[in-house]
Structures are given as structure tokens and as C-alpha cells.
Amino acid sequence: MEQKTKLMTLILFLILTAVSCDRPNCHNNNPIFEKYEISSVDYKTELIQQIEKIGQQNLTFWFESYIKENEKEYIIVNIQHDSLCAKGKILVNDWNKIEGIRRTNGQSYSGAELQGLTFNVEKDSNKIELVYNDLIRIVD
């Protein structure tokens, strides 16, 4: 009987692992995302054009990492849709809903889906910034 229990536990574990939340594979077909760095104006301009064409509400976002640069804090997210596979560097000024990411430097959130993520686009003469606005929930 004990052997059956171990076997059932193993099978259940394997099934849960197979269906757990994991970012779907995607492949970038846009040469601009290959040619330019994620922080470049060219990359961000193309990303914004693609997002506006598809609509933020139609995208899925997956947390990749947390970074701090020049006293500013960002999250790097994978942005996906049938016709889009890119990364976004999003400035976060309000950490209320996502404090856990900041507190752990993103360590335990890698690969988590960021459901309902919204951000604004702020432009000035020489820079474009994606700025975190809100999030419904993190599915880890």
C-alpha cells in the first residue's frame, strides 16, 4: 500500500508540474527587437507601436527580473501575443501592489504571470519610458 501511495504522489506531482503556470514559448520575428537593446529609443518606439496596434489588454506579461539603475527601479517583463514576443523595461515608482518583487529583488517571482499589468508611456525629446501603472495580480 505504501508503494502505491508513493507512486500516486509522484504521478500527481508530475501532472501538477506539467500544468503549472509557465510562460508559453514564443519566437521573436521582429528584427528591431534583435538589433537594438531593450533600453534604446528605437526598441521602445517599436515596442510601443506594436502594443498600440495589439492593445495592452490583449497582451500577456511575464516577470523576468528586477533591476536598479541610476537610483531608479525597473521590472523586466516578457510581453507576448500571437504576433509579439518582446521584453519591456518598466519603471516602477509605486511599489504598493508589487512590494514582494522589490523586497526579494525578484528572486522568487521569475516566470510569474503579471495579470492585468498596465503602464503608461512617458516621452520627452530624447527618451521614452514605460512607467508601471497597476496590476490585478501575480500568478506564480
Image: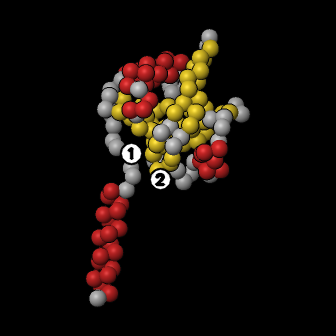
Q: Position of residue 129 (x, y in %)?
A: 58, 24
Residue 96: numbered disc: none
Query: What amino acid is at disc 2?
Result: Asp
Residue tagged by mark 2?
Answer: 140
Judged from this view, the residue extending furthest toward the right is: 71
In the image, 112 versus 137, the foreground residue is 137
For residue 6, above or below residue 86: below
Q: Is residue 35 visible?
A: no
Judged from this view, the residue extending furthest toward the bottom is: 1
Question: How far apart in space, not on screen, are marks 1 and 2 (Cα)?
Answer: 11 Å
Residue tagged by mark 1?
Answer: 23
On screen, residue 76 versus residue 17, left or right, reads: right
Residue at horizontal 33 percent and vertical 72 percent from the top: 10
On screen, residue 60 versus residue 68, left or right, reads: left
The mark that comes first in sequence, 1 or 2, is 1
Q: Position of residue 11 (x, y in %)?
A: 29, 70
